[in-house]
Amino acid sequence: MSLYQPEPVEISTRIRPGEWTESSLEELVTTYRAKILAMGARVSDVVTDVERNDDGSVKVAVSWAKPALADDLAADDLAAETAADATTVSRDTVSRDTVSSDGTSRHPGTTGGSSSV
C-alpha cells in the first residue's frame, strides 16, 4: 500500500523590498527547486514563478503538479527509462567494434577491409 498524495506541492515566499538581491533570489529558487526534486519530481514537472512587484517586493513560488494517480507517475517514469535504455542500446550497437585475435578491428557484419588497432 502506498501513501501517495496527488495534491500539488508548492514552496513559496514573499520578500519585502530591500531584503533581496538578484544573487539571493537565484539561490532561493535553486534551493526550492532542489527540495521539490528531492520529493520525487522530475525536472520537467517543476514550475518556477517569480513575480516582481512595482514596490520592489518579490514573490517566489516553485511548484510540482503531481499526477492524480501514483501509477501514472510510475508509468511515465518507466516509459522515460525505456526510451533512454533503447537509445543507449542503439548507440552502443552502432559504435561497437570487434577486435580479432590478430589485433585488427572491424565493424560487426562486415567482411574484410579490417584496419589495425
Image (tube, helix red, strand yellow):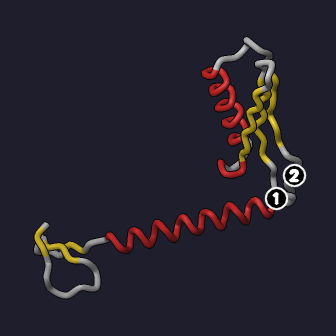
At 79% across and 28% down in the image, what residue appears? 59
Residue at the extreme bottom of the image, as rendered: 111
Say whether marks 1 and 2 touch (CB < 8 Å): yes
Residue 6: mark? 2
As rendered, which of 83 and 117 lies closer to the eye?
83
Q: Name the residue under label 1.
A: 70
Looking at numbered disc 2 in the image, what kind of residue is underneath it? Answer: Pro
> Residue 69, how many percent across, how many down?
85, 60
SS class, disc 1:
helix
Q: Is residue 54 left or right of residue 84?
A: right
Q: Is residue 71 left or right of residue 90?
A: right
At 81% across and 52% down in the image, what residue appears? 66
Which quarter of the rendering shows the N terminus? Answer: bottom right
The vertical placement of 6 against 97, above or below, is above
How packed mark 2 is, by other alpha carbons closer than 10 Å (few <14, some 14-19, many 20 or more), is few
Residue at the extreme top of the image, as rendered: 18
> Residue 117, how many percent across, how many down?
14, 66
> Residue 40, how many percent across, how many down?
72, 47
Residue 114: mark? none
Residue 83 placement: quadrant: bottom right
> Residue 28, how many percent across, how many down?
68, 26
